[in-house]
């Protein structure tokens, strides 16, 4: 009983409503003349809140506003809740959203474990889930469903694209600093496979626990390894602290290259270009990608505390909600199968993507850009952190449906 009450408090405390007042109704009302309801489940205050969280919610609001706030003559409303990065809470929230509140699509899902769990709820409910934050390749692998879409580029794509880009620049010998959890271990394993296929080699690796504070020994081991590339298979605070330690030990000045699989623009902004200059990463989005992304970035930064730059996860939330609403309009209904068919049929065209594809298994296919962080003196204005090195076409970046072992599509 205490556990049930605690979970209920989580649900009530985590639930918030934006885009206007809402009188909770039934799924049938949402399908007819009532509002079209979209849900966002995300980490609103924990370790993923900086890269996804409140910023992703704000991006979804922007998408709804830019769409005009209505579709098919129906008001669009957004329901928001935090799962605290816990799959059981995410599942309870998803069931409430779908079964009681008439939500037709859930997005966000910064934690991959939550995203995998919610995908199964969406499949059972015959509704839609779109992961814009979590990065596990299993979302379109063994955990895939016909009712789910993975908008964030995944661990497989991050590894294949970054290795491709760095090897093109002559980086053949690699050393890994890896967080000792599934995310980091999988990233290192996949990247090592691609390095070997490209004629390179892994010369060493150091593992560390999640939330480690001292990276001096790991950085020294990498520095003394003879590697041309030090690969950071990390995220969040671990990644930031390793970057800071690498700067203190003069890694870049010594001629080695730092390659981060999931470096975010907002992290460059918070750590500073002095420490991040020279890092390389692959991404589908950065503020100065084009005029549209820069204009959107400026609008976004005015709406969030501290004028923070958006992350790829947050730009994904905007793009995914926009594509979903386009599909609803094109289908003339919010009925799940019709909307999913339109989402797969229509090319993904938005501020950061040209002719992207929603594949049958839910994998969004689009080009990635390998970028390098500029030195402070190279920046020409606000949010000018990256210089592009090469565009890596979507063909060949992503794992095939067959290799992913998706149970529904073989």
Image: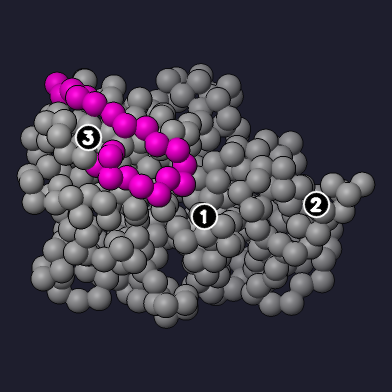
Is residue 216 a member of the stretch shown in magenta? yes
Q: Which percent across, then down, holds residue 44? A: 59, 62
Query: SS for tag 1?
Result: loop
Please state which of residues 129 and 370 is positioned toward the viewer in this rendering: 370
As helix, strand or loop, the secondary structure at mark 2 comes to helix
Asked if 265 appears above or below 346 in the picture, the reply is below
Q: How many marks?
A: 3
Residue 336 visible to the viewer: no
Residue at 20% x, 76% y is: 381
Q: Nearer the viewer, mark 1 or mark 3?
A: 3
**In this view, the mark in front (3 or 2):** 3
N-term mark: 1 or 3:
1
Furthest toward the bottom, the residue is 302
Residue 7, numbered circle: 2
Find residue 359 and report its horizontal and vertical position in percent. Answer: 45, 36
Q: Which residue lies furthest to the right in this view?
A: 1
Specify the label residue 47 is tagged with.
1
Task: Give me the C-alpha separation between circle 1 and circle 3.
Answer: 27 Å
């Amino acid at each position: 009983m205490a556990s049930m009450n605690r979970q209920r408090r989580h649900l009530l405390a985590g639930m918030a409503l934006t885009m206007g007042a809402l009188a909770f109704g039934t799924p049938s009302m949402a399908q007819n003349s009532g509002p079209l309801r979209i849900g966002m489940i995300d980490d609103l205050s924990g370790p993923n809140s900086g890269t996804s969280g409140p910023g992703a919610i704000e991006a979804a609001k922007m998408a709804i506003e830019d769409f005009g706030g209505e579709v098919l003559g129906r008001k669009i409303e957004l329901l928001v809740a935090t799962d605290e990065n816990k799959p059981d809470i995410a599942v309870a929230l998803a069931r409430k959203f779908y079964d009681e509140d008439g939500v037709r699509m859930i997005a966000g899902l910064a934690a991959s474990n939550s995203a995998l769990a919610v995908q199964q709820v969406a499949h059972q409910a015959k509704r839609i889930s779109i992961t814009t934050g979590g990065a596990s390749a299993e979302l379109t692998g063994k955990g895939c469903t016909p009712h789910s879409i993975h908008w964030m580029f995944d661990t497989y794509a991050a590894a294949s694209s970054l290795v491709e880009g760095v090897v093109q620049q002559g980086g053949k010998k690699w050393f890994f600093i890896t967080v000792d959890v599934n995310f980091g271990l999988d990233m290192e394993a996949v990247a090592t496979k691609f390095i070997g296929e490209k004629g390179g080699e892994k010369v060493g690796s150091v593992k560390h626990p999640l939330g480690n504070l001292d990276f001096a020994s790991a950085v020294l081991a990498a520095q003394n390894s003879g590697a041309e590339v030090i690969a950071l298979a990390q995220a969040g605070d671990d990644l930031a602290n390793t970057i800071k330690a690498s700067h203190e030990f003069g890694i870049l000045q010594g001629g080695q290259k730092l390659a981060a699989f999931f470096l975010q623009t907002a992290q460059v902004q918070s750590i500073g270009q002095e420490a991040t200059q020279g890092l390389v990463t692959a991404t589908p989005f950065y503020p100065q990608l084009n005029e549209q992304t820069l204009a959107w970035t400026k609008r976004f930064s005015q709406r969030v505390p501290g004028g923070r730059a958006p992350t790829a996860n947050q730009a994904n939330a905007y793009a995914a909600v926009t594509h979903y609403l386009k599909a609803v309009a094109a289908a003339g209904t919010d009925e799940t199968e019709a909307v999913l068919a339109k989402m797969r049929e229509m090319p993904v065209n938005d501020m950061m993507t040209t002719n992207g594809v929603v594949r049958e298994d839910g994998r969004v296919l689009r080009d990635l850009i390998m970028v390098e962080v500029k030195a402070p003196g190279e920046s020409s204005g606000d949010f000018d952190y990256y210089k592009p090195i090469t565009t890596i076409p979507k063909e060949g970046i992503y794992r095939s449906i067959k290799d992913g072992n998706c149970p529904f599509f073989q």
